[in-house]
Amino acid sequence: MQRPSFTTALASTLTALSLLLGASAVQAQTALASILAKKQISIAIPTDYPPYGYVGIDMAPQGLDIDVARLIASKLGVKVELLPVSSANRIPYLQTKKADLVISTLGKNAEREKVIAFSSAYAPFFQAVFGPKAVSVKAWADLGGKTVAVTRGAMEDQELAKVAPSDLQVRRFEDNNATISAFVAGQTQFVATSAAVAATIIQKNPQISAEYKLLLKDSPCFIGVNLGEDALRSRVNEIIAEAKKDGTIEALSKKWLGRGAGELPL
């Protein structure tokens, strides 16, 4: 029996390899097809981080991230399974395919981009100064002569130092609980903190009538998608783009964060 030539053998090997790689590529792009076939999507969400996600008095998840998860499912025409996660396990839930998407105040950075892909930004996440509605504050100069509580060394402390007027009295506390307590007790007129912390303060202490005043730093939220699932990521991006265009994203931001979404990165 004649042995195949080196050229023939090489061609056969390359053909087989090409077919294998092609099959792998197809296999990698199965998330969207699987979701549409079973008519259900599993989305990891927070339940301990208001206003993005928390458990309401009816024991059901609610918040900005939950509304976005339901929006994605609705636009795909499927049911949604909401999976509560923590900051530590939200990416592993995605990588082990317990979840198809992660919508959980997820910030994008170079390290995370090595292990997962990201959608366009869907919501702002920010640190800001909050204070009583009765006191008008439109610019940093308006804080002159007033008092603000901040956690020592936190991002809010660092950002406040860049913009605060020289006569603003900054009172620094050693942890978030002490900062919150000082503001709630009326020891300071304002507080510099994250939107999530402020939402909890406002929710639990309606008598303060606190509201968003001035932005310190923006750090938008993105939806996490598994690497290689480009079809799913593209469809999610289309849904986000539509929601930005028709005002849904803006409305959700105002509903849960007390301010508009602004310009969100792609």
Image: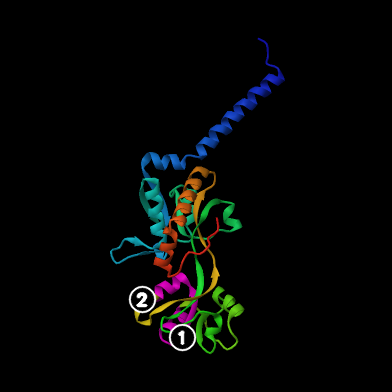
Residue that lies at the very extreme toward the left in this rendered image: 58
The answer to which image quadrant residue 13 occupies is top right
Quadrant in which the N terminus appears? top right
| Residue at the image position 28 percent from the left and 64 percent from the top | 58
Q: What kind of residue is marked 1?
A: Gln
For label 2, the residue is 204
Q: Which residues are magenta?
A: 177-201
**Relative height, residue 39 to residue 142 (above, below):** above
Residue at disc 2, secondary structure: helix
The residue sitting at 51% across, 80% down in the picture is: 150
The residue pinned by badge 1 equals: 189
Residue 60 percent location from the top left of the image: 31, 61
- Residue at 39%, 48% (x, y): give it: 75
Pointers 1 and 2 in contact (C-beta within 8 Å): no
Q: Secondary structure at mark 1?
A: loop
Res 7 → quadrant: top right
Badge number at residue 105: none
Which quadrant would the C terminus be assigned to in this image?
bottom right
Q: Where in the figure is residue 166, as x and y percent of width and height?
A: 60, 87
Provide the major secondary structure of the magenta segment. helix
Residue 171 seen anywhere in this rendered image of the structure: no
Q: Nearer the viewer, mark 1 or mark 2?
A: 1
| Amino acid beneath label 2 | Lys
